[in-house]
Image: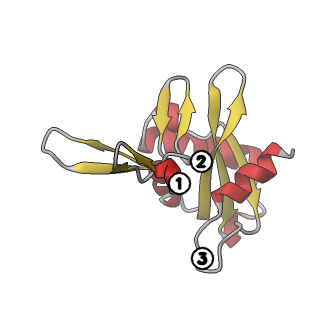
C-alpha cells in the first residue's frame, strides 16, 4: 500500500486521457501499457481491433523487448476452428493489416503467436503477467 500513496493521493496504476469534451478514455494499467518508439499503446484497443477479425476467438496483447523500439506489440491469439489449419504466415500478415487499418499503423502487433488457450485466473481474466513471464524465458 505504501507504493500507491504519494502526497496522500492514491495512485491506481490506471492510465487514461481526457478528450476535448471532458470525457475520460481508459488506456490500460500502467504495467500493461506498451511503450514503443515513443508511443504509449494500450492493450485493450489493440485487443478490441483483433476481436473484430473473424479468425480471432480470444487474444491478449503484451509488449516484448525490442532493441530499436524499446518494446513492440505482441499478440497472443486463440484461433477460430475454421482458421486453425490456415497458413500461419499469411494469416499473421492479414491480422497485422487488419489492426493497422482498424486502429493506427504503429499499434499493429509485430509479433504474433497462435496458441490453443490463454492463461487465465480462476475468475476467467487473462493473465498477461504470465504471458510476459513466458516470453522473457524464451
* Image coordinates for residue 68, horizontal then vertical, percent: 67, 19
Q: Secondary structure at mark 1?
A: helix
* Image coordinates for residue 82, horizontal then vertical, percent: 68, 69
Apparent side of residue 106 relative to residue 89 in the rendered image (left or right): left
Q: Residue drawn at (59%, 47%), measured in percent from left and top?
A: 95
Q: Which residue is mark 2?
A: 95
Marks 2 and 3, how far apart at CA:
25 Å
Q: Residue drawn at (55%, 39%), measured in percent from left and top?
A: 34
Of badges 2 and 3, the one in the foreground is: 3
Q: In which quadrant will I find the C terminus?
A: top right
* Image coordinates for residue 2, horizontal then vertical, percent: 50, 52
Question: Badges 1 and 3: C-beta atoms under 8 Å apart?
Answer: no
Q: Which residue is mark 1?
A: 50
* Image coordinates for residue 32, horizontal then vertical, percent: 55, 48
Of badges 1 and 3, the one in the foreground is: 3
Question: Badges 2 and 1: C-beta atoms under 8 Å apart?
Answer: yes
Earlier in the chain: of badge 1 and badge 3, it is 1
Q: Which residue is mark 3?
A: 124
Q: Secondary structure at mark 2?
A: helix
Q: In the picture shown, does residue 113 fall above or below 104? A: below
Amino acid at each position: 500500500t505504501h507504493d500507491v500513496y504519494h502526497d496522500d493521493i492514491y495512485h491506481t496504476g490506471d492510465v487514461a486521457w481526457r478528450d476535448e469534451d471532458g470525457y475520460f478514455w481508459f488506456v490500460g494499467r500502467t504495467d500493461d501499457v506498451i511503450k514503443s518508439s515513443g508511443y504509449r499503446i494500450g492493450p485493450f484497443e489493440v485487443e478490441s481491433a483483433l476481436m473484430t477479425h473473424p479468425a480471432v476467438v480470444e487474444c491478449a496483447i503484451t509488449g516484448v523487448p525490442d532493441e530499436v523500439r524499446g518494446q513492440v506489440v505482441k499478440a497472443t491469439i486463440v484461433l477460430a476452428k475454421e482458421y486453425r489449419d490456415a497458413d500461419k504466415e499469411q494469416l499473421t500478415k492479414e491480422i497485422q493489416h487488419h489492426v493497422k487499418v482498424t486502429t493506427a499503423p504503429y499499434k499493429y502487433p509485430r509479433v504474433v503467436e497462435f496458441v490453443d488457450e490463454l492463461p487465465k485466473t480462476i475468475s476467467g481474466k487473462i493473465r498477461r503477467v504470465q504471458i510476459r513471464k513466458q516470453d522473457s524465458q524464451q
